[in-house]
Structure formats: structure tokens, C-alpha cells
Image (cartoon, rainbow, N blue to C red):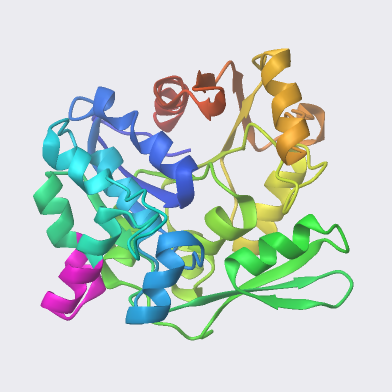
Amino acid sequence: MKKYKTPKIKVVSFGGGTGLSVLLGGVHRFYPNYIDNITAVVATSDTGGSTGILRQEFNIPAPGDIRKCIAALSPRHDVLHKLFEFRFKNPKSSLNKHSLGNLILTALTEITGSFATAVKEACKILNTIGQVLPISEENIQLVAQFDNGQIIHGEIPIYQYGKLQKGRITKIWLEPKNLKVTPEVIRAINNADLITFGPGSLYTSTIASLLPKAIKKALKTSKATKVFIVNLLTDYGETYKFDAFDHYCTLTKHIKTHVDAVIINTGPIPQNIKTHYFKTERAEPVKPSIEKFPKDVKIITGDFVKIENKKVRHNAIKVWEAITPHVYN
């Protein structure tokens, strides 16, 4: 791994959904003493909820995961932050379930003529400590092939088909295949000291953010320390019965790049929480299976669990505390 003369590092974090935004929420503790700059690179292929509706009606990239990451990197805790994260809850209204932040990003795209510019403006409004970048400004589609030959288009349909357990995902890609990657993403990778992958839905969030050819090429030549943060729980629609090694193999297969270190939780999850997740989502704790990993991969274990409102999340501060020493060794 690369050694540094200064403790201040430039970080690029890939992912999407709740997992990445939770991780980004822990960055504030380390900025600016250890982390000089952070760039969140977000998949924009989500098709669900408010995001899915706005994609169809305005032909824009998915704003939902972008919004979560902007909010996570914002140091503001005032009414403006709450406004950005506000979600309408009136079944009789056409705005029901829409996030105001999603609507703001849509409006900014209409005003500026560019989704990437809209994201930059939203970052300014929320005064984020780093930058958030979509992988592309194109209205991309996620496509998956299962081992039974079935090809499914769209993030939500992929997940729903996966839950039927008729097959396993064997390959996943983005369309259009030759999409244009946001230029700042490649620059951020080239300048990074540390690159993190995940946590988040393995195929439809983490890997989805890494699929463009330009991103994979930049990752392959990057000298940054690369760290994969394994999910705490399996996902019935994507990673049912996967252990930590299965997660690692799936990621490296798709990005074709060596990963220097893997963060694996070995801390306990309360039995009542495990029972709840299994009954409602068929989700189970990911087994560490440390003995399966190759010797040239650093395995970082620990208790990284945080329970919030009966939901299992990564303790972001503990994750960053575990990662940062390995960047210098």
C-alpha cells in the first residue's frame, strides 16, 4: 500500500443508497485534520419511488441517492437541511412520497441545463465538506443477466426478480454501454490517496457505480489504497447466502482491480434485530469467512455495528477509524 508524508488524504467513495450516505456521515469527525478532501461518486440508476417518477417525467439521472449523500456531507443541522430531506406524506396529493431535495435537484437541472451542475449547486446550498458526483449525466439503465439466462432491465425489476429466487445474477452492466462519465470523477480517482467501495446493495448500488469503462480503467491505474466495506447483512434479492468472500469475489470480478483491504464486521447483532430482519427481509448477518481470502488482501475486522431505530447500520466513525491507519502502512 502507498505511504504518505502527510496525514491529510484525498478520498473517493463509490456507492449509492443508504449505505454510502451512512459512511459519509462519519467523515466530519476526520475532516480536515486527516481527510483533506472527499468525493462521493454515486450510481444514478435507481428506478424506485420519487426518483423513478422524476426520471420518467423529466428524463434525468436518478437524484435520490445523490440527495442522501449531499445531506450526509453537509455540516448544517438547521431548517435548510431538514427542508432538503423533507418528504411529503399525503396519500391524496400528487407530491406524496416525493422528497423535496429530489424536486430541488430536478428544478436545478431545469434551470442550469445540466444535472452535474445542479448537483454542484445543491452542494453549495448545503455547504458540503466535499463534493458529490454522479457517475454520468446520462439517463442510464442498469441491466442484469441471471444464471437461468433471464435478462432484466431496471434496478427495481432486477431486485424484485432476484427475490423470486429463480436465479442468481451472473453479470450486470449499464446502458448505454459507451456512456460518458462525469470528467471530475476520473480526476478525483487520479488524485485519490484512498478509494472506498460500499457499503450498499452489492450489485445495484456499489458495483453499479463502478461499471463504466472509463472508471474501471482509472481504478486499474490508480495508486490509491483501495478498501471494500462489506455489508453487514445479506440481501435476499441480490446476495442471499453470500459470505464476505462472496461479496469480495463479486466486486473484484466486475471491476477487475485489486482491492488492498476489506472491512468485515465481526461484532454481534442483537438476536431480536436478527429475527426481525429475517422475518421481514430474509436477511442474515454476513459470515466473515476470513480464511478464504488471499494473503495479499488485508482483512480488517471489528465491531462496526450501530443500531438506529431497530435498523442495522455501519458505525461510520468506527469504520473510518479502522481504515485510515492502513492508508499509511
Seen at 17% across and 52% down, the residue is 123
Seen at 18% across and 40% down, the residue is 81
Confirm whether residue 192 shows in the render. no
Left or right of 107? Residue 86 is right
Seen at 75% across and 47% down, the residue is 236
Left or right of 302? Residue 189 is left
Front in this rendered view, residue 142 or 5: 142
Name the image quarter holding residue 193.
Answer: top left
Confirm whether residue 127 shows in the render. yes
- The spot of residue 247 in percent (x, y) is 70, 45
In the depicted structure, whether residue 94 falls above or below residue 267: below
Left or right of 321? Residue 192 is left
Residue 114 lies in magenta, yes or no? Answer: yes
Name the image quarter holding residue 162.
Answer: bottom right
Span shown in magenta: 106-119
The quadrant in which the C terminus is found is: top left
Seen at 42% across and 55% down, the residue is 91
Front in this rendered view, residue 107 or 130: 107
Front in this rendered view, residue 44 or 82: 82
